[in-house]
């Protein structure tokens, strides 16, 4: 449960902005989207390898 302390005279917009920022940091929406669909281990592993080769190529070009 998120608790946002609202100071005396503080606008609702400001409090809402704080709430949104705090909620985003918890990662609830990101995890929910991740859990909506199942990805096979082989597919996720393939994506990891693809990303690793991309990063390796970037570092190689940098040198």
Image (cartoon, rainbow, N blue to C red):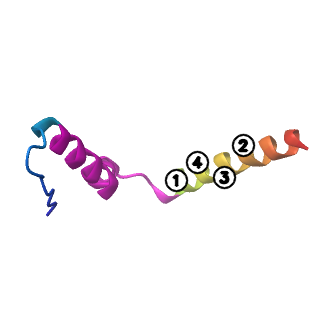
What secondary structure is found at the residue carrying circle 4? helix
Among numbered discs 2 and 3, the one appearing first in the sequence:
3
> Badge 2, how many Cα within 10 Å: few under 14, some, many 20+?
few
Evaluate if marks 1 and 2 touch, with contact meaning CB atoms under 8 Å apart.
Answer: no
**In magenta segment, residue 55:** no
Alpha carbon distance from label 4 to label 3: 5 Å
2 horizontally vs 47: left or right: left
> Badge 4, how many Cα within 10 Å: few under 14, some, many 20+?
few
In the image, which residues are magenta? 14-41
Residue 28 higher or lower than 33, as above or below: below
- Assign the C terminus to one quadrant of the image: top right
Q: Which residue is mark 1?
A: 44
46 or 60: which is nearer to us? 60
Evaluate if marks 4 and 3 touch, with contact meaning CB atoms under 8 Å apart.
Answer: yes
Among numbered discs 2 and 4, the one appearing first in the sequence:
4
Q: Which residue is mark 2?
A: 54
> Badge 1, how many Cα within 10 Å: few under 14, some, many 20+?
few
Query: For residue 5, what is the image quadrant?
Result: bottom left
Disc assigned to residue 49: 3
Disc assigned to residue 59: none
């Amino acid at each position: 449960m998120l608790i946002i302390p609202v100071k005396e005279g503080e606008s609702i917009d400001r409090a809402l902005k704080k709430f949104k920022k705090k909620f985003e940091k918890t990662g609830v929406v990101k995890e929910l989207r991740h859990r909506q669909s199942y990805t096979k281990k082989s597919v996720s592993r393939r994506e990891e390898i693809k990303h690793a080769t991309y990063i390796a190529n970037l570092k190689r070009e940098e040198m």
